[in-house]
Image (cartoon, grey):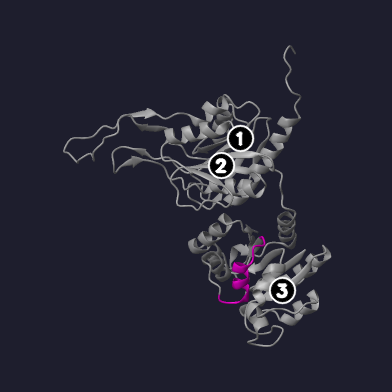
């Protein structure tokens, strides 16, 4: 394949030289593009010698025909058209922000916008820069658009600090490139129904009951399933997230609306993943007018909402059903109980009181409890990585389900 390797300005830029060699060993042709800052850490000559191709360093210079020529002005389009994959390693906070916001002020960022090829980025930076809300928001935005992010590792950093921010290992980056180029399509032919986000239960025209769910976990599952070849229907409560590409999204507000949308689409799915944080209760009576403040106390009577997971799982047939359990105590015990009571095939359980595992976080710490008795605890991962692991387990369970002999009448 023809891979364009973007090298940006960080101390880890020297590691990209070895990456060129490893990619060539796998038979790929490498075109290196360097930002101006990258040249402060390693010379273009190094990459030219390794790749056997000229290294592109500027948008309007170092191109065939000389500075200011027509070839120079449109070369980013030509490179974009002949690229099978764009890999950026290391990817600085600056380039991640530019990619996310559509800023094109050099060759690499212009190439990113001009290319329709899949994109893999391997961030590397100071731990505080990586954990900053702006960087995490940009990374989440790129993931929602289908960019594969190879998470940085943890350890001693060049700045003297210790933490996450080190460029991922060569093997991790190569594995990501292989999976993207091969197009992992193990969900091709499946229809995946996903619920995400909170529900809002109205009290009056201006007040409602809800929870802190952002929808990030469910949206990550939906995006990952689509990339793996599934037809995806996403039923979402109120969320500020963008609809992942190639997905049919149905927006709902209340638990009853979510139940109707799920029931309308459940018959056509083969896998159902219920990641939404559905309100357990709703006001028994909704006021048509704003409730005015008064001197007396106000009692709000609640009634239970429908149990969407349990309702559809009773009629699941050959479908695979996955539920979520957000707990604050006795996580394993409650998850196993829910697995049995809801007739689910897998429960994804987490302790939402833990740092990095609660609502609206970009990471999660979960354990996958499967009907066949397998418990799979996962370390703290990005929600996109958690989504991939959930789908890996779903594919395993789906395969086991398909391999069972069909039930015959009279036997």
Label 3 sits on residue: 32
Numbered disc in front, either 1 or 3: 1
Label 1 sits on residue: 269
Assess whether mark 2 and mark 1 are in contact (beta carbons under 8 angstroms).
Answer: yes
What span is in magenta?
Answer: 105-118
Label 2 sits on residue: 233
Q: How crowded is mark 1: few (under 14 residues within 10 Å), some or many (20 or more)?
A: some
Q: Residue at x 47, y 48 (%)?
A: 214
Camera-side residue of 363 and 331: 363
- Magenta stretch contains residue 75: no
Which residue occupies the extreme top position in the image?
410
Q: Residues within 10 Å of mark 3 (few under 14, many from 20)?
A: many
Res 2 quadrant in image:
bottom right
Residue 79 visible in the shown view: yes
Numbered disc in front, either 2 or 3: 2
Q: Measure the C-alpha gap from mark 2 to mark 3.
A: 39 Å
Q: Which residue is drawn at 68% across and 34% down?
A: 374
Q: Measure the C-alpha gap from mark 1 to mark 2.
A: 9 Å
Q: Is mark 3 on a helix, strand or loop?
A: strand
Residue 181 in the image: above or below residue 80 = above
Residue 319 in the image: above or below residue 222 = above
Q: Which residue is drawn at 62% across and 76% down?
A: 107
Q: What element carries label 2?
A: strand
Residue 379 visible in the shown view: no
Q: Which residue is drawn at 67% across and 46% down?
A: 229
Q: Is residue 284 left or right of residue 348?
A: left
Residue 53 in the image: above or below residue 218 = below
Assess whether mark 3 and mark 2 are in contact (beta carbons under 8 angstroms).
Answer: no
């Amino acid at each position: 394949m023809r891979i364009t390797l973007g090298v940006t300005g960080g101390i880890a830029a020297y590691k990209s030289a070895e990456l060129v060699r490893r990619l060539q060993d796998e038979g790929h042709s490498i075109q290196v593009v360097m930002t101006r800052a990258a040249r402060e850490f390693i010379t273009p000559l190094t990459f030219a010698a390794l790749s056997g191709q000229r290294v592109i360093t500027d948008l309007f210079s170092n191109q065939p025909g000389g500075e200011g020529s027509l070839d120079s002005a449109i070369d980013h389009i030509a490179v974009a058209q002949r690229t099978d994959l764009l890999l950026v390693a290391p990817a600085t906070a600056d380039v991640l922000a530019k990619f996310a916001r559509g800023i094109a002020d050099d060759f690499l960022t212009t190439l990113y916008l001009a290319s329709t090829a899949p994109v893999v980025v391997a961030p590397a930076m100071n731990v505080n820069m990586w954990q900053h809300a702006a960087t995490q928001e940009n990374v989440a935005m790129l993931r929602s658009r289908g960019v594969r992010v190879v998470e940085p590792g943890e350890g001693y950093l060049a700045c003297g600090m210790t933490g996450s921010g080190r460029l991922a290992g060569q093997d991790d980056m190569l594995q990501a490139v292989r999976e993207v180029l091969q197009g992992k399509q193990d969900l091709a032919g499946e229809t995946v129904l996903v619920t995400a986000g909170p529900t809002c239960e109205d009290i009056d025209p201006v007040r409602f009951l809800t929870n802190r769910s952002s929808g990030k976990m469910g949206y990550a599952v939906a995006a990952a399933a689509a990339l793996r070849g599934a037809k995806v229907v996403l039923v979402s409560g109120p969320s500020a997230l963008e609809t992942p590409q190639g997905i049919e999204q149905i927006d709902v507000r209340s638990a009853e609306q979510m139940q109707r949308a799920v029931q309308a689409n459940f018959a056509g799915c083969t896998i159902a993943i219920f990641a939404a944080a559905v309100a357990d209760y709703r006001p028994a009576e909704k006021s048509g007018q704003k409730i005015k403040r008064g001197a007396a106390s106000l009692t709000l009577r609640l009634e239970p909402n429908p149990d969407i997971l349990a309702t559809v799982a009773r009629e699941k047939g050959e479908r695979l059903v996955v539920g979520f359990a957000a707990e604050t105590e006795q996580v394993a015990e409650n998850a196993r109980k829910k697995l049995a009571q809801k007739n689910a095939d897998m429960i994804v359980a987490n302790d939402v009181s833990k740092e990095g595992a609660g609502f609206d976080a970009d990471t999660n710490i979960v354990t996958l409890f499967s009907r066949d008795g397998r418990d799979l605890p996962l370390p703290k991962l990005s929600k996109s990585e958690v989504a991939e692991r959930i789908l890996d387990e779903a594919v395993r369970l789906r395969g086991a389900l398909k391999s069972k002999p069909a039930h015959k009448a009279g036997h």
